[in-house]
Amino acid sequence: MLTVIGEALIDMVGRRGSAQDRSTYRAIPGGSPLNVAVGLARLGGPTTLLARLSGDAFGQVLRAHALGNGVALAGAGDVPEPSTLAIASLDEEGIASYAFYVEGTSDWQWTAEELRRIPADTTILHTGSLASWIAPGGALITETLQIRRASAQCVISYDPNVRPGLLAGPDAARELIEPYLRIAHIVKASDADLEWLYPDRDPLDSLRAWSGSGPDLVVLTRGGQGAAAIGSDGALVTQMARPVQLVDTVGAGDAFMAGLLGAVRSHGLDRPDAIGRLDAAAIDGLLREAGEVAALTCEREGADPPTAAQLAAALRRR
């Protein structure tokens, strides 16, 4: 079982183009954890999303989207708070920027009882994004993962998915994010994440610093420049991205995360000791599969990751 903890929200997505072109928005299920869960389920892994879904109309849309994509919902009852909204604007090149409406919404009001609903057969436990650092629930999620790490029962994965508009500056953000480096076996971040968190340092140097802080595998995504990773042996592995016919970048980072964890599962690496023994060749293979999942998603509109069959066909073509 692959279990994802975090938010499921509604992306209000504008049309690609100038500000005038983006006057009409569509309501699309989103949120990094939901996107990762859907991506994992489409890749064929049994997947559970542990989320707080509102009982409002948007919450019903989110529930239907998860279940329709084969994602199980672990005790996700109809909570009374409203659904979270994200406004996604696409520029002329299809690059997305976001604004969030999060005050008092459902995704952050976690209780310890809710977080005890993690399925007992979970072998990969992923969290990240807004729910991992927005109060009051972020601290409870951190504590939950600390307990899981101490028990050595599963591989723990983390993606901070930094949103500067919701964080009180890099100093405060590092205090919320860096504790996960001592908890997670796998950590993924984008170059934009690390440039904002550590503005005076090259992202590769930040990647090296994170590698020395606890994770067995740290991964840096660099958009069209591909990805880089460091395993427990400290060696840097790089993977170039293939050219894509870009439609937009919505959900691309989440698709990469799903592709990475899906590859970990499919290659029988979903054990803490296996992640600690990854060599350069194995890491290169994981990056290749994750990069292809992200590339296929960028060639479609919105967060629409591929199925296992579509990924296999794309990898054969490469």
Image (cartoon, rainbow, N blue to C red):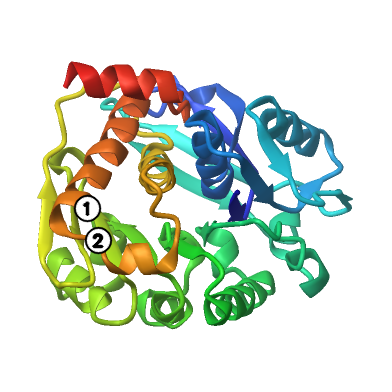
First of labels 2, 1 by sequence position: 2
Dot 2 amino acid type: Leu
Left or right: residue 264 compared with residue 45: left
Up-down relation of residue 70 to residue 136 (above or below) = above
Q: Residue at x 11, y 51 (%)?
A: 238
The kind of secondary structure element at disc 2 is loop
Q: Residue at x 41, y 60 (%)?
A: 162
The kind of secondary structure element at disc 1 is helix
Up-down relation of residue 122 to residue 266 (above or below) = below
Q: Is residue 301 visible?
A: no
Q: Which residue is mark 2?
A: 278
**Residue nearest the observer in this picture, 122 or 176:** 122
Q: Which residue is mark 1?
A: 283
CA–CA distance in space, label 2 to label 1: 6 Å
Residue 211: percent from left, percent from top = 24, 74
Dot 1 amino acid type: Ile
Left or right: residue 198 compared with residue 252: left
Image quadrant occupied by the C terminus: top left
Tag count:
2
**Label 2 close to label 1 by CB (< 8 Å):** yes
Up-down relation of residue 15 to residue 99 (above or below) = above
Q: Residue at x 28, y 29 (%)?
A: 295
**Mark 2 neighbour class, 10 Å CA radius: few under 14, some 14 to 19, many 20 or more:** some
